[in-house]
């Protein structure tokens, strides 16, 4: 069975900090940032490199600020 490595890109300026993506992530990759964006929202960020590229976070994000890239690991 092929293994996949994912990479998440978050548009932190558009993130409103609803944290729905955190609960949808089976690997616990996403965490709350200690900083705020220019609109005053605490946004989410990548917490570790265990992303499997499932894209659950991008699917549930109400604002569409998450992009997931997936690559096959040899």
Image: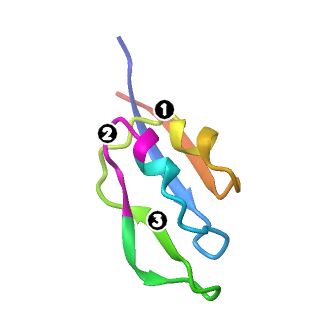
Tell me the crowding category of disc 3: few under 14, some 14 to 19, or many 20 or more residues within 10 angstroms, Cα based: many
Tell me the crowding category of disc 1: few under 14, some 14 to 19, or many 20 or more residues within 10 angstroms, Cα based: some
Identify the residue at image location x=55%, y=58%.
9
Q: Is residue 9 above or below residue 51?
A: below
Identify the residue at image location x=62%, y=88%.
38
Taking the magenta stretch, the answer to whether it contains residue 26 is yes
Per the model, the C-alpha gap separating discs 3 and 2 is 15 Å
| Quadrant of the snapshot with the N terminus | top left
Per the image, label 1 sits on a secondary structure element best described as loop
Give the residue furthest to the right.
63
Identify the residue at image location x=60%, y=41%.
60
Q: Which residue is mark 3?
A: 44
Per the image, label 3 sits on a secondary structure element best described as strand
Residue 30 marker: none
Q: Which residue is mark 2?
A: 27
Residue 54 marker: 1
Viewer-closest of 44 and 50: 44
Q: Seen in the image, is 63 located left or right of residue 72?
A: right
Q: Are marks 1 and 2 in contact (CB under 8 Å)?
A: yes
Taking the magenta stretch, the answer to whether it contains residue 21 is no
Foreground mark, 3 or 1, reads: 3
Q: Earlier in the sequence, mark 3 or mark 2?
A: 2
**Residue 50 in which image quadrant:** top left
Tell me the crowding category of disc 2: few under 14, some 14 to 19, or many 20 or more residues within 10 angstroms, Cα based: some
Task: Give, as a single range, the part of the protein colored magenta.
Answer: 23-31
User: Where is residue 47 drawn, in percent x and y?
Assistant: 32, 60
Per the model, the C-alpha gap separating discs 3 and 1 is 17 Å
User: Where is residue 52 drawn, in percent x and y?
Assistant: 39, 35
């Amino acid at each position: 069975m092929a293994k996949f490595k994912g990479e998440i890109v978050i548009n932190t300026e558009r993130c409103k900090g609803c944290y729905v993506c955190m609960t949808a992530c089976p690997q616990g990759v996403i965490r709350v940032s200690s900083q705020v964006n220019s609109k005053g929202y605490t946004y989410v960020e990548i917490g570790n490199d265990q992303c499997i590229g499932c894209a659950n976070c991008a699917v549930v994000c109400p604002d569409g600020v998450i992009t997931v890239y997936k690559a096959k690991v040899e």
